[in-house]
Image (tube, helix red, strand yellow):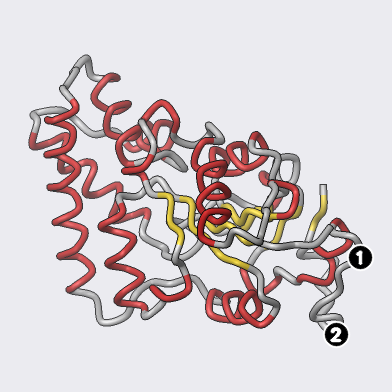
Amino acid sequence: MALKAVLLSFNGIVINDESIRQTLSNQLLLDENLRPDEDDYTQVCWGRSDRACLKGLLAQRGRMMSDEAIDKLLLKKSVAYEAWLEGLEKLPLYPGLDDLIFRCRAADIKMAMVTGSQRRDVLNVLKKAELSEHFIEIVAGDDVPADESKPAPNGYTKAIAQLNVTYPDLQLRPDECIAVEDSFAGIEAAKRAEIPVVGVAHVYPNHMLQRRATWVVDYLREIKFDWIGEKFGGMRMDIDENPPEAEVTET
């Protein structure tokens, strides 16, 4: 058995944008004459799709909306997100992302993205970051219903299915992938899809991820295929780069 694919989350792994996402969600509530709450956002939205987040926040406030009305609000949010991107001199990408992508490509490991963000937002970021060519397969928030958002496994199972369509000879199985996640919901989704998970402590501290993820690192640059390879039939790569014991935890 070999490691064949790396499936990355987007918010919290590729780009540090949770603050603006919360600001835009709060503005949607204010536009509907509803009061935002920071704790509500953390509990309802972190790791979940934009649609699931918005529906959850509205439901907490006793507001029910049609799918068409939700679509209009999500489009409004995406337009505002795009304006935010255009105003940035430099994207807040997480350090180590370029190196991880390079090592995946060098090892012929396929990459896909599994995210709850709207596809429009993801594509805009990847285009601006000049990373579009590396992520042919994207499962975005538009692609799964709100009740199938993380922590449900559906996004991950869909990503594997899409990779198998794109690469018919791959015959990819969940246990031949790793997921790279930052949130509790994302880690749970990957594990429910039977995919080993690298938890990256970008949002939650390292010790809070240790009982949830298969491995835990503080930074993307610490993801090394040599120690991950121990779970994949002894696959060895980057054999001169051993993770610091204090920073990497396997659970």
Quadrant in which residue 146 is drawn? top left
Quadrant in which residue 119 is drawn? bottom left
Residue type at the position of mark 2: Asp
Quick one: quadrant of the N terminus? bottom right
How crowded is the residue under tag 2: few (<14 C-alpha within 10 Å), some, or many (20+)? few
Residue type at the position of mark 1: Gly
Residue at 36% in and 78% down: 129
Depth check, mark 2 against mark 1: the one in front is 1
- Image location (x, y in percent) of residue 72: 12, 39
Residue at 62% in and 69% down: 220
| Left or right placement of residue 235 versus residue 42 in this view | right
Q: Which residue is identified by label 2?
A: 240
Q: Nearer the viewer, residue 28 or 149?
A: 149
| Left or right placement of residue 3 versus residue 112 in this view | right
Per the image, label 1 sits on a secondary structure element best described as loop
Per the image, label 2 sits on a secondary structure element best described as loop
Q: Nearer the viewer, residue 211 or 39?
A: 211
Residue at 65% in and 34% down: 192
How crowded is the residue under tag 1: few (<14 C-alpha within 10 Å), some, or many (20+)? few
Q: Give the number of the disc on residue 234.
A: 1
- The total number of labels drawn is 2
Q: Could you tell me how far apart the alpha carbons at marks 2 and 1 are, in whole angstroms?
A: 15 Å
User: Is residue 217 placed above or below 208 in the rendered structure?
Assistant: below
- Image location (x, y in percent) of residue 78: 20, 53
